[in-house]
């Protein structure tokens, strides 16, 4: 529903999970069932299909009569990206000002390495009255851990989620401090990462997952075979580091509840 106070629609980031339609949450599904909202979704080019839209289509839902692809090109050119974010915001702003909600379909989770954040900030810069809502979703790394039968984190484990583009040197530094590393977007550095894992003796503790949960999902447990190959952009490398040296941890942080209860009932 639109904002009754201002008659302005909301921008709603609808998280769809990493690729399996069964991972669409009930809250996201309810938004997709609406007939009064405009569907929008990101595409990398005018000739490419939307990965997010594909998740919905595999769920069996038909594409509504009115829908709007928004172009977010794959580039590191900040000026070019800024222009496209502005064009996308300007495309949906009139719809919102007319009192209609806009759904922005996002694979994974809308707050995690997603284009939704750029659209949200640009829209708010154009009109601060626009209300934003995010429907959270399953992330690719949580789905990958479930697929692999590997815990994401246990007890006092430390976790780092990092785009691999920061470089192998940073990844190596993180290995000294974290039990679980999730390396996102590893395509450009796959050979260097394999070399690092081999040198650190962690090959058997790493696994690559591409397009988790989708029909094109690929799981590679023997990451040494990835050397000299090309991986998909939508891939992650999950690394466990059982060799990490743990420092002293503060004990007794949890307060006991039995004593106050006993005093209260005495």
Image (cartoon, grey):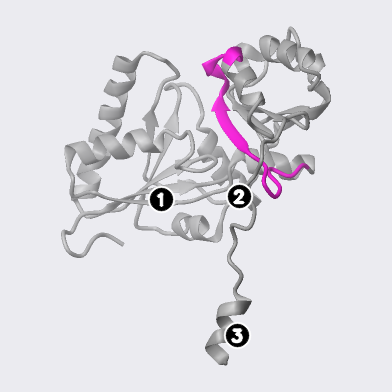
Position of residue 146 in the picture relative to residue 47 (left or right): right
The mark that comes first in sequence, 3 or 2, is: 2
Residue 196 visible to the viewer:
yes
Q: Where is residue 29 in the image (x, y as percent from the top left)?
A: 52, 57
Residue located 59% across and 57% down the image: 253
Q: Where is residue 243 in the image (x, y as percent from the top left)?
A: 77, 28
Position of residue 231 in the picture relative to residue 199 (left or right): left
Secondary structure found at label 1: strand
The mark that comes first in sequence, 1 or 3, is: 1
Residue located 75% across and 42% down the image: 147
The span picked out in magenta is 150-169
The residue pinned by badge 1 equals 134
* Residue 52 in the image: above or below residue 33: above
The mark that comes first in sequence, 2 or 1, is: 2
* Residue 240 in the image: above or below residue 142: above
The residue pinned by badge 3 equals 262
Local packing at callout 1 (Cα closer than 10 Å; few below 14, some 14-19, many 20+) is some
| Residue 157 among those drawn in magenta | yes
Residue 103 marker: none
Local packing at callout 3 (Cα closer than 10 Å; few below 14, some 14-19, many 20+) is few
Secondary structure found at label 3: helix
| Count of marks placed on residues | 3
Residue 220 visible to the viewer:
no
Instruction: Measure the alpha-carbon separation of dots 2 and 1.
Output: 20 Å
Camera-near label (3 vs 2) is 3
* Residue 201 in the image: above or below residue 216: above
Q: Position of residue 227 (x, y in %)?
A: 76, 10
Say whether marks 2 and 1 touch (CB < 8 Å). Answer: no
| Residue 247 among those drawn in magenta | no
The residue pinned by badge 2 equals 59
């Amino acid at each position: 529903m639109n904002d009754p106070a201002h008659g302005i629609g909301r921008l709603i980031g609808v998280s769809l999970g990493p690729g399996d339609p069964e991972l669409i949450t009930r809250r996201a599904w309810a938004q997709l069932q609406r007939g009064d909202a405009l569907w929008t979704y990101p595409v990398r080019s005018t000739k490419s299909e939307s990965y997010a839209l594909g998740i919905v289509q595999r769920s069996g839902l038909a594409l509504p009569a009115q829908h709007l692809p928004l172009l977010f090109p794959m580039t590191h050119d900040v000026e070019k990206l800024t222009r496209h974010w502005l064009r996308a915001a300007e495309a949906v702003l009139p719809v919102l000002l007319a009192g209609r909600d806009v759904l922005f379909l996002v694979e994974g989770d809308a707050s995690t390495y997603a284009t939704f954040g750029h659209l949200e900030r640009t829209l708010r810069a154009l009109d601060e009255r626009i209300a934003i809502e995010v429907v959270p979703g399953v992330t690719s790394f949580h789905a990958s851990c479930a697929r692999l039968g590997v815990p994401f984190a246990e007890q006092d484990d430390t976790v780092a989620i990092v785009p691999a583009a920061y470089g192998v040197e940073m990844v190596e530094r993180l290995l000294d401090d974290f039990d679980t590393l999730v390396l996102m977007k590893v395509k450009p550095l796959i050979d260097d990462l394999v070399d690092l894992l081999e040198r650190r003796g962690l090959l058997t503790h790493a696994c690559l997952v591409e397009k988790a949960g989708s029909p094109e999902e690929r799981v590679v447990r023997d990451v040494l075979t990835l050397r000299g190959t090309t991986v998909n952009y939508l891939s992650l490398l999950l690394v466990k580091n059982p060799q990490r040296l743990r420092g002293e941890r503060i004990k007794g942080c949890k307060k006991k509840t039995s004593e106050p209860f006993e005093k209260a009932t005495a």
